[in-house]
């Protein structure tokens, strides 16, 4: 029968990547004598090799074999653990990853790099022969002989059964090769009183007529060859016997035929296994390609999470049956029970929602795991001495958010290494410890997750940033800015303070992209820095992209949803704080700020009863450090809404980030605050342009 | 029905072995290391045990030694699943009471053919 194993390739790949991560973090922490760690690294390599071989990823197997051999020597204490070896192994981890990715996508890989690393590995292994496995498969294939008659003399040791072997199964296996005649010899059976039931006293004389080779027969006895006396003799057609002896106990017990050396009798049959295997390999290779291309992505979920879901669904079914029973025969006396039932339904739904969300949640360590290696490499490259401290890696985060936050975090860490941490000399001169510290922290705050990247380096040079921004024409030289406003300049496109562009960072394409990515996830980033003491970048992200805490507001007949995360406060307009400036822009004085008022009905051209600014409701929202007041007719409930993508269902609309379906079945739009601000800005510019066609100054500058 | 205990720390290998066996009509119980394998073996009986050698907590050799101490496992075939086809490893397995070994990378047909040597 054929068993198709290609369905296991995705889980093998997932496991391999996990294994590689484990190897990487293990190698980074590897110290001499830490045998548990080196064992776990070895096991990871071992599993990858084993799996890859099964699926026919031969290049992975071959390469990993080298790595495994090196690790094996370390494991057995035959090799000291040096930093050079660790470097090679780290590089090898990269190579294995490359190979597995190439195998997954069916794409080409950087052969040169693999070759190089593989050469270095081989050199490290002192030129040990690594192609042993490859040789095993290239056995010479000889045509199978016609039926031969074999005489097999099998005398097991008394204790054979204790290893779990049973002659009857061996004979069954032999019988499958051809026609088998069995003759048992019970002559050494002791008297009944002396019999130990655990021992085996019989021996056998077997006659097999088969086309199988002597090796096939020997293979069947492979597991017992140390615990028996075994003679296999080929009796060929002319009765000219030649024999091959597999005899570990040095007793020659064959009287019939004279022994001839093994080589004479050995005829290697066409290795049907080998050809079978390559067939399977082809199949699985063909199977993986389409699967890997459609990047479905999978989540490994703990059984407890699934169990709790099933449990909840069970409860939901109970509630449902209770309600439907109630509904079939309803009168007003049962209102109480109905309310109770509905209450229960609400509870069930809420719990179910939470449980489902929890399935998408993964500990942030998935994103953090790559950073020790990154910092290690960067430290080597820059020659700075530093360590990475990671906290809160168990904090859970939605998988989608996690996948998209990785790159921005890499940028931030590169920046911390390159711009933040000073060289050892400078640090010592400033009375700081020689080794710099970069710390990475994650924690939950409200419905958000906060990721902090801090360094204890020189901090951000405010003057430097400011003068650079002036030079780039980003701000006016006379402008007075607060610290946080100055730091925000770092995120302007094209801004870079590094005097020289280095390999690591400083091309000025990083920080604005970082900010954009974070905003695309519905999050925000803040910078805090103290000269001489270091900087902290704080990234605020929503826990999930699928559900949003929203404030429902009414404008005309429409309901809109404002993301709760962007709301600063809601208030009723008081006339004395209103200011009207040029360009039809109303400003509201909110403590120290002047907040421009954007009436939603104007922006979206809706007929509304409430057009009077006085006493109108204003929802002050913040985006990009810019506050605006959205004028609405009424504030409705706050609730969690499920985000439906407009892009998927309709098309992208400026000022709207998505839609949702409310309890009454109607559709409500979710407002995109940055988009709305941009809309308002453009509108103001258009009006300004109409009024003063020759004066194209940016009106929106203060917005 | 022939009942097999499959012990391996690698999910995918375990799944594959188990899948292969099930597709041939065997019943399987899985364990992710020797420790778990041992506790699943205690108070139960199996017709065959297939175990990896390199595993955390308790490796295959130790599992084998422990299993042989159980009355139920005195004659149960125990096969070590290993990439190490060196005689050294085979001897260690044998010394611990292993019945035989299966060399990874295995192919399903081979696996099924091979275990016929020890179970029905």
Image: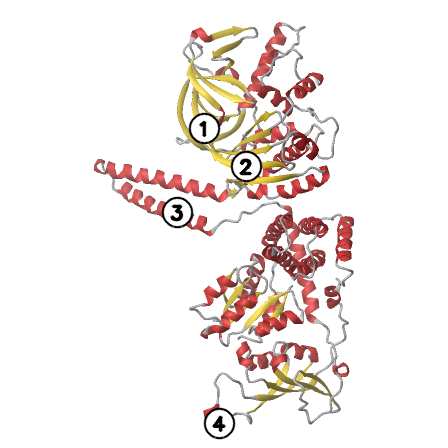
Q: Earlier in the sequence, mark 2 or mark 3?
A: 3
Query: Pointer 3: residues within 10 angstroms few (<14), some, or many (20+)?
Result: some
Circles 2 and 1: CB atoms closer than 8 Å: no
In three-dimensional space, the C-alpha distance between marks 2 and 3, rounded to whole angstroms, equals 36 Å
The nearer-to-camera label among 3 and 4 is 4
**Residue A266 shown left or right of residue A492 in the figure:** right
Image height check: is B3 above or below A629? below
Q: Where is residue A117 in the image (x, y as percent from the top left)?
A: 75, 51
In three-dimensional space, the C-alpha distance between marks 2 and 1, rounded to whole angstroms, equals 27 Å
Q: Residue at x 44, y 50 (%)?
A: A304
In three-dimensional space, the C-alpha distance between marks 1 and 3, rounded to whole angstroms, equals 27 Å
In three-dimensional space, the C-alpha distance between marks 3 and 4, rounded to whole angstroms, equals 67 Å
* Observer able to see residue A543: no
Query: Pointer 2: residues within 10 angstroms few (<14), some, or many (20+)?
Result: some
- Mark 3 lies on residue: A313
Could you confirm whether marks 2 and 1 are on the same chain? yes
The quadrant of the picture occupied by the N terminus of chain A is bottom right
Tag 1, which chain? Answer: A
Could you confirm whether marks 2 and 3 are on the same chain? yes
């Amino acid at each position: 029968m054929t068993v198709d194993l290609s369905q296991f390739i995705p889980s093998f790949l997932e496991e391999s990547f996990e294994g590689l991560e484990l190897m990487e973090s293990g190698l980074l922490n590897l110290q001499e004598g830490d045998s548990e760690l080196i064992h776990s690294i070895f096991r990871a390599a071992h599993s990858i090799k084993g799996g890859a071989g099964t699926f026919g990823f031969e290049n992975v197997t071959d390469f990993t074999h080298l790595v495994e051999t090196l690790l094996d020597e370390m494991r057995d204490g035959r090799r000291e653990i040096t930093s050079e070896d660790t470097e090679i192994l780290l590089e090898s981890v990269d190579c294995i990853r490359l190979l597995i990715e190439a195998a997954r996508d069916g794409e080409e890989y950087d052969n040169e790099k693999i070759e190089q690393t593989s050469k270095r590995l081989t050199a490290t292994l002192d030129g040990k022969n690594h192609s042993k496995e490859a040789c095993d498969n290239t056995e010479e294939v000889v045509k199978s002989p016609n039926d031969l008659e074999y005489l097999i003399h099998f005398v097991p040791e008394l204790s054979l059964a204790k290893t779990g072997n049973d002659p009857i199964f061996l004979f069954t296996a032999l019988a499958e090769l051809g026609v088998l005649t069995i003759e048992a010899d019970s002559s050494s059976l002791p008297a009944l009183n002396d019999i130990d039931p655990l021992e085996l006293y019989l021996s056998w004389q077997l006659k097999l007529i088969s086309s199988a080779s002597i090796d096939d027969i020997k293979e069947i006895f492979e597991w017992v060859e140390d615990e028996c006396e075994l003679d296999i003799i080929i009796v060929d057609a002319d009765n000219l016997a030649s024999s091959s002896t597999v005899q570990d106990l040095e007793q020659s017990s064959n009287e019939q035929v004279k022994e001839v050396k093994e080589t004479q009798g050995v005829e290697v049959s066409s290795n049907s296994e080998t050809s079978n295997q390559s067939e399977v390999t082809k199949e699985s290779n063909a199977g993986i390609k389409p699967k890997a291309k459609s990047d479905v992505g999978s989540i490994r979920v703990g059984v407890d999470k699934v169990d709790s879901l099933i449990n909840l669904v069970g409860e939901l079914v109970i509630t449902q049956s209770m309600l439907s029973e109630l509904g079939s025969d309803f009168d007003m006396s049962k209102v109480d029970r109905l309310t109770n039932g509905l209450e229960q339904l609400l509870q069930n739904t809420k719990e179910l929602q939470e449980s489902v969300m929890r399935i998408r949640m993964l500990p942030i360590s998935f994103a953090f795991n790559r950073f020790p290696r990154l910092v290690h490499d960067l430290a080597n490259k820059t020659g700075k001495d530093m360590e990475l401290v990671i906290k809160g890696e168990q904090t859970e985060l939605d998988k989608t958010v996690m996948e998209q936050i990785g790159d921005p975090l890499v940028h931030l860490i590169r920046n911390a290494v390159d711009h933040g941490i000073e060289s050892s000399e400078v640090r010592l001169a400033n009375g700081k410890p020689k080794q710099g510290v970069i710390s990475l922290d994650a924690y939950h705050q409200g419905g958000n997750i906060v990721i902090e990247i801090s360094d204890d380096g020189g901090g951000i040079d405010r003057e430097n940033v400011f003068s650079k921004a002036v030079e780039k024409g980003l701000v006016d030289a006379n402008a007075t800015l607060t610290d946080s406003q100055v730091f925000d300049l770092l995120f302007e496109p094209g801004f870079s303070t590094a005097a020289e562009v280095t390999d690591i960072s400083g091309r000025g394409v990083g920080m604005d992209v970082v900010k954009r990515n974070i905003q695309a996830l519905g999050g925000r980033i803040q910078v805090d820095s103290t000269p001489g003491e270091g900087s902290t970048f704080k990234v605020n992200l929503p826990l999930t992209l699928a559900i949003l805490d929203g404030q429902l507001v009414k404008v005309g007949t429409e309901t809109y949803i404002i993301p709760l995360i962007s709301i600063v406060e809601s208030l009723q307009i008081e006339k004395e704080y209103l200011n009207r400036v040029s360009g039809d822009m109303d400003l509201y004085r909110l403590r120290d700020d002047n907040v421009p008022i954007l009436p939603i009905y104007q922006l979206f051209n809706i007929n509304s009863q409430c057009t009077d600014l006085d006493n109108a409701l204003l929802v002050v929202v913040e985006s990009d450090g810019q506050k605006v007041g959205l004028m609405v007719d009424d504030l409705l409930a706050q609730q969690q809404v499920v985000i439906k993508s407009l892009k998927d269902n309709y098309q992208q609309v400026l000022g709207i980030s998505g839609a949702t379906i409310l309890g009454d079945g109607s559709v409500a739009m979710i407002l995109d605050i940055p988009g709305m601000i941009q809309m308002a800005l453009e509108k103001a510019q258009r009006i300004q342009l109409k009024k003063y066609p020759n004066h194209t100054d940016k009106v929106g500058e203060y917005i | 029905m022939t009942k097999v205990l499959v012990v391996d720390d690698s999910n995918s290998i375990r799944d594959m072995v188990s899948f292969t066996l099930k597709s041939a009509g065997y019943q399987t119980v899985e364990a992710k290391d020797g420790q778990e394998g041992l506790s699943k073996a205690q108070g139960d009986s199996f017709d065959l045990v297939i175990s990896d050698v390199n595993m955390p907590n308790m490796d295959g050799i130790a599992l084998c030694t422990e299993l042989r101490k159980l009355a139920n496992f005195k004659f149960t075939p125990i096969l070590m699943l290993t990439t190490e086809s060196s005689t050294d490893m085979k001897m260690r397995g044998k010394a611990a009471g292993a019945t035989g070994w299966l060399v990874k990378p295995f192919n399903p047909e081979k696996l099924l053919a091979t275990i016929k040597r020890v179970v029905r």
